[in-house]
Image (spheres, rainbow, N blue to C red):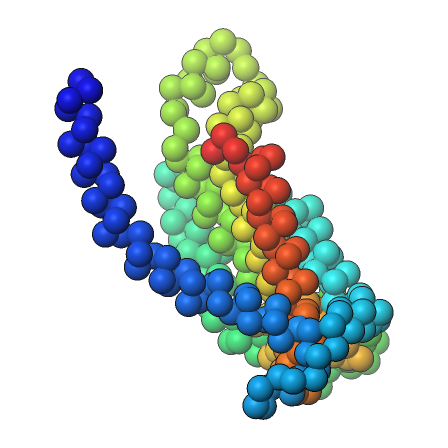
């Protein structure tokens, strides 16, 4: 066995030697170098032209931590996470339980709920901007029907982000539903039949069979929801543009509007570094503590 294992180890080494360098090159070019450059630019007062020369140390980070608009953007990201974990994922699981079987019409409903996820984020943002428009949008139309007059939701600093949360729920609900359906279809039906024969109720079957067997997919869904919420950006630009009064910015849109468009590349790089640290910290911590056995 020891002799036979030597060719296997040699074959594995040769395979790694062939496949590892291209992966390392891609990782270095598209991950390590951009992150390193962002960290380097973040300690300069730089407008993106020429070579950065005005070293300012951690001033960009100090300004960032004292910026009220950044605080609002961070809170908005947290609100998206709370909405995703507290409302979107439970609803997706409930719908997956209804549509995981082979009953007539289930495939059609799966497609209907999954279609918003396929739609491009920019297109989704433009569609919902039209829906929320105070002159001819659906929300304003309902408001006028009840005699409350036209309502410009996206210009209301108190409720504009509620519209963003609604779009997030609508856009990504189907993705998580399909994840749960895939997990449910992988559960052995014999387990349910045996539990039913033993007299287990539907609630007991869900608690002691479905949830434990679906736990790895639930953890994966939570991971996608949190990381996606931290990086949320594409819908913000066509929907609200970060307004009104920067009340609907997320961290990435804050980076774009306060860093890139205002030619404050050093400041924007500092935002990118902070976001990178948050994402990496969550990803490694979540993988270490909650997904180590998956």
Q: Position of residue 294 (x, y in %)?
A: 47, 33
Q: Residue at x 68, y 62 (%)?
A: 274
Looking at this view, is 137 or 24 the one in front? 24
Q: Is residue 168 left or right of residue 154?
A: left
24 left or right of 141? left
- Residue extending furthest toward the bottom: 49
Q: Which residue sits furthest top?
A: 198
Instruction: Where is residue 35? Give x, y as percent.
Output: 55, 66
The quadrant in which residue 39 appears is bottom right
Foreground pick, 144 / 93: 93
Where in the figure is residue 15, as x and y percent of width and height?
Answer: 22, 45
Q: Which is nearer the eye, 202 or 125?
A: 125
Q: Residue at x 62, y 84 (%)?
A: 52
167, above or below 133, in the image: above
Q: Is residue 124 visible?
A: no
Q: Position of residue 119 (x, y in %)?
A: 46, 68
Q: What's the residue at 39%, 24% (across, down)? A: 189
């Amino acid at each position: 066995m020891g002799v036979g294992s030597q060719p296997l180890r040699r074959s594995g080494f040769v395979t790694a030697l062939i496949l590892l360098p291209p992966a390392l090159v891609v990782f270095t070019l598209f991950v390590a170098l951009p992150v390193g450059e962002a960290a380097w630019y973040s300690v300069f007062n730089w407008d993106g032209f020429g070579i950065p020369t005005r070293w300012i140390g951690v001033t960009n980070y100090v300004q960032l931590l004292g910026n009220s608009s950044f605080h609002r953007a961070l809170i908005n990201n947290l609100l998206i996470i709370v909405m995703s974990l507290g409302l979107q994922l439970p609803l997706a699981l409930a719908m997956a339980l209804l549509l995981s079987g082979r009953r007539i019409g289930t495939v059609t409903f799966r497609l209907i709920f999954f279609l918003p996820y396929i739609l491009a984020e920019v297109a989704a943002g433009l569609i919902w901007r039209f829906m929320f428009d105070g002159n001819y949008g659906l929300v304003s139309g309902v408001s006028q029907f009840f005699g409350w007059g036209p309502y410009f939701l996206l210009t209301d600093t108190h409720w504009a982000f509620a519209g963003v949360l609604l779009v997030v729920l609508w856009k990504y609900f189907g993705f998580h539903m399909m994840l749960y359906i895939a997990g449910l279809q992988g559960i052995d039906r014999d387990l349910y039949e045996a539990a039913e024969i033993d007299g287990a109720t539907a609630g007991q079957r869900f608690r002691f069979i479905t949830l434990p067997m679906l736990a790895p997919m639930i953890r994966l869904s939570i991971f996608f929801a949190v990381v996606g919420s931290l990086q949320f950006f594409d819908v913000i630009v066509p929907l609200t543009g970060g307004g009104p009064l920067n009340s609907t910015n997320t961290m990435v849109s804050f980076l774009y509007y306060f860093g890139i468009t205002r030619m404050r590349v050093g400041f924007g790089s500092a935002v990118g570094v902070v976001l990178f640290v948050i994402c990496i910290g969550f990803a490694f911590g979540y993988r270490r503590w909650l997904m180590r056995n998956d």
